[in-house]
Image: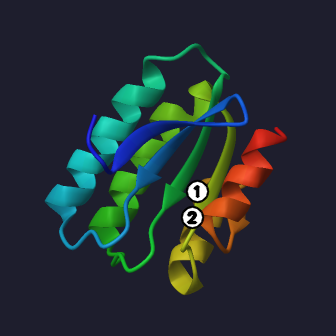
Amino acid sequence: MSERIRWEIHDGVEILVSDFSKITSPDDARAAAKESEEAICARPLGSVRRVSCVSDSFFTDELKKITEEYSKNIRPYTKAAAAVGFTGLKGIILKAINRSIKFCDTLDEAIDWLKKQ
């Protein structure tokens, strides 16, 4: 697993951190999404607590399609999902794609919320 996609243990709770921040190309986004998806889909259905970080990333129509496909594929495996850095248009689009995601201002806030889910 890369530094972008990593499992972390917080107070005994396993959380997948998918760091999509500072991604500058669709190819990089696709590779990170694929790695995250593989990590999530290797777990039992409905078991994954995850946080996606997207600070300083760009968002285009192509990235919207990548995000939609990724979200659709991982939804059955997700127990709880949080997001950091989804502001403005990115936040509006993600909320339309995934209504159950919790938006947080910081990674620490997201992890604290996920630990309780």
Please give the name of the residue rendered at 74% of the width and 45% of the height, measured from the top-left corner.
114
In contact (CB < 8 Å): disc 1 and disc 2: yes
Q: Which residue is denoted by mark 2 in the rendering?
A: 94
Number of the label disc, if any, that sits on residue 9: none
> On screen, 88 above or below 99?
below
Q: x, y percentage for residue 27?
A: 15, 57
Give the quarter of the image for residue 5. Answer: top left
How many labels sit on residues?
A: 2
Separation of disc 1 and disc 2 at Cα? 5 Å
- The residue under label 1 is which amino acid type? Ile
Give the quarter of the image for residue 70. Answer: top left
Q: x, y percentage for residue 110?
A: 69, 57
- The residue under label 2 is which amino acid type? Leu
Q: x, y percentage for residue 22?
A: 30, 73
Please give the name of the residue rendered at 76% of the width and 52% of the height, measured from the top-left corner.
112
Q: Residue furthest front?
A: 11
Please give the name of the residue rendered at 76% of the width and 41% of the height, measured from the top-left corner.
115
For the question of whether residue 100 can be seen, the reply is: no
Please give the name of the residue rendered at 44% of the width and 49% of the height, measured from the top-left corner.
18
> On screen, 8 above or below 60?
above
* Pointer 1 local density, CA inside 10 Å: few below 14, some 14–19, many at least 20: some
Q: What SS does tag 2 mark?
A: helix
Q: Quadrant of the N terminus?
A: top left
Q: Residue furthest right?
A: 116
* Pointer 2 local density, CA inside 10 Å: few below 14, some 14–19, many at least 20: some
> On screen, 78 above or below 94?
above
Number of the label disc, if any, that sits on residue 97: 1
Q: What SS does tag 1 mark?
A: helix
Q: Residue furthest bottom?
A: 88
Taking the image as shown, residue 117 lies to the left or right of residue 9, namely right
